[in-house]
Amino acid sequence: MWSQRWGRHAAEMLLMAEPEIDAVFCGSDQIAAGFVEAVRERGRRVPDDLAVVGYDNWEVLSTETRPALTTVDMNLEVLGRTAAQHLFAAIDGKATPGVHTLPCQLVIRDSTSPPGVS
């Protein structure tokens, strides 16, 4: 289950196995928020000692985590709308087979660079 608790647990396991690690890419912003919390509890500083990147750009979480999370924004609103358009086209007999790609972006915040540094 993707949760902040899972992120805290993952941080404990990873930091015990690889104490010198200096960067982590988490599979969700929730996991990253928990990871940041556990790192801070162990006396390490984000991003000075360890950079953390999340995934989803769930702004209600990524902007409120301290430090604010750098995260991958998949532009899920556009992704969902595009998927629905392809589904409706297929239902109408106008399928659009193949691989369809959409742009995403890395939203850089304070968990990967000290404030004021870009």
Image (spheres, grey):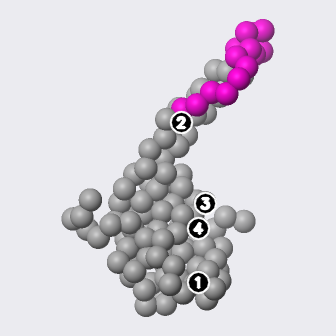
Figure label count = 4
| Residue drawn 26% across the image and 68% down it | 115
Q: Position of residue 18 (x, y in %)?
A: 58, 83
Q: What element carries label 3?
A: loop
Rendered location of residue 70, percent (x, y): 42, 60
The mark closer to the camera, 2 or 4, is 4
Instruction: Please tell me which residue lies in front, 67 or 50.
Output: 50
Q: Which amino acid does label 3 sit on?
A: Gly
Question: 87 or 113, which lies in front?
Answer: 113
Confirm whether residue 100 shows in the render: yes
Q: Residue furthest left?
A: 116
**Which secondary structure lies at badge 1?**
loop
**In the rendered view of the protein, which quadrant contains the N terminus?**
bottom right
Whether residue 12 is visible, yes or no, is no
Position in image of residue 90 (x %, y %)? 75, 16
Residue on which disc 2 sits: 77
Q: Which of marks 3 and 4 is in front?
A: 3
Tell me the crowding category of disc 1: few under 14, some 14 to 19, or many 20 or more residues within 10 angstroms, Cα based.
few
Mark 4 Cα shell of 10 Å, populated few (<14), some (14-19), many (≥20): many
Asked whether, in this view, residue 104 is left or right of residue 111, the answer is right
What residue does disc 4 label?
31
Please report the residue visible at 54 percent of the width from the left and 87 percent of the height from the top: 19
Instruction: Give the image quarter of residue 94.
Output: top right
Question: How many angstroms separate mark 2 from mark 4 (CA)?
Answer: 21 Å
Looking at marks 1 and 4 on the same chain, the residue that comes earlier in the sequence is marked by 1
